[in-house]
Image: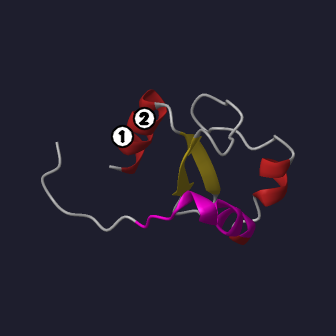
Amino acid sequence: MFNYRRKLPAFHERNIEDILKRFKLWKKFEDGELKCIICECVITNDNFGCILLSKEGTVNVACSNPECLEKVYDVIN
């Protein structure tokens, strides 16, 4: 599946607030309006999967559902 190494930034769940504030997504998260870019479920502390940064500068998030994370992997590779 992986034939090369790639650096992937990671963070601990206790840093979610700081990370989301940095990307100006915290208010949406707090208000229950932050949604997975794939399945559109509401993102919570329990289902936070990853942050996606596009070349165009947009910031999206995905939930921790394995099917969503697989689709994210397909998009970034």
- Tell me: 8 left or right of 5: right
Task: Count every numbered label the image shows and give the total.
Answer: 2
Outermost residue to the front: 14
- Where's residue 62, x and y in %? 56, 42
- Residue shown at 60% from the left, 48% from the top: 61
- Numbered disc 2: secondary structure: helix
- Where's residue 22, x and y in %? 70, 71
Circles 2 and 1, Cβ within 8 Å, touching? The answer is yes
The residue pinned by badge 2 equals 71
- Displayed quadrant of residue 46: top right
Q: Amino acid at mark 2?
A: Lys
- The answer to which of 23 and 43 lies nearer the viewer is 43
- Where's residue 1, x and y in %? 16, 42
- Tell me: 19 left or right of 2: right
- Look at the image and say whether residue 44 sits in the magenta stretch: no
What colour scheme was applied to this rendering of the protein? secondary structure
Q: Amino acid at mark 1?
A: Asp
Circle 2 packing at 10 Å, graded few (<14), some (14-19), many (20+), is few
Span colored in magenta: 9-21
- The answer to which of 77 and 14 lies nearer the viewer is 14
- The answer to which of 13 and 64 lies nearer the viewer is 13
Outermost residue to the left: 3
- Tell me: 8 left or right of 40: left
The residue pinned by badge 1 equals 74
Magenta stretch secondary structure, dominant:
helix
- Look at the image and say whether residue 17 sits in the magenta stretch: yes
- Where's residue 43, x and y in %? 68, 40
- Residue shown at 49% from the left, 31% from the top: 65
* Distance CA(mark 2)–CA(mark 1): 5 Å
Q: Considering only vertical position in the picture, is 67 above or below 23?
A: above
- Displayed quadrant of residue 15: bottom right
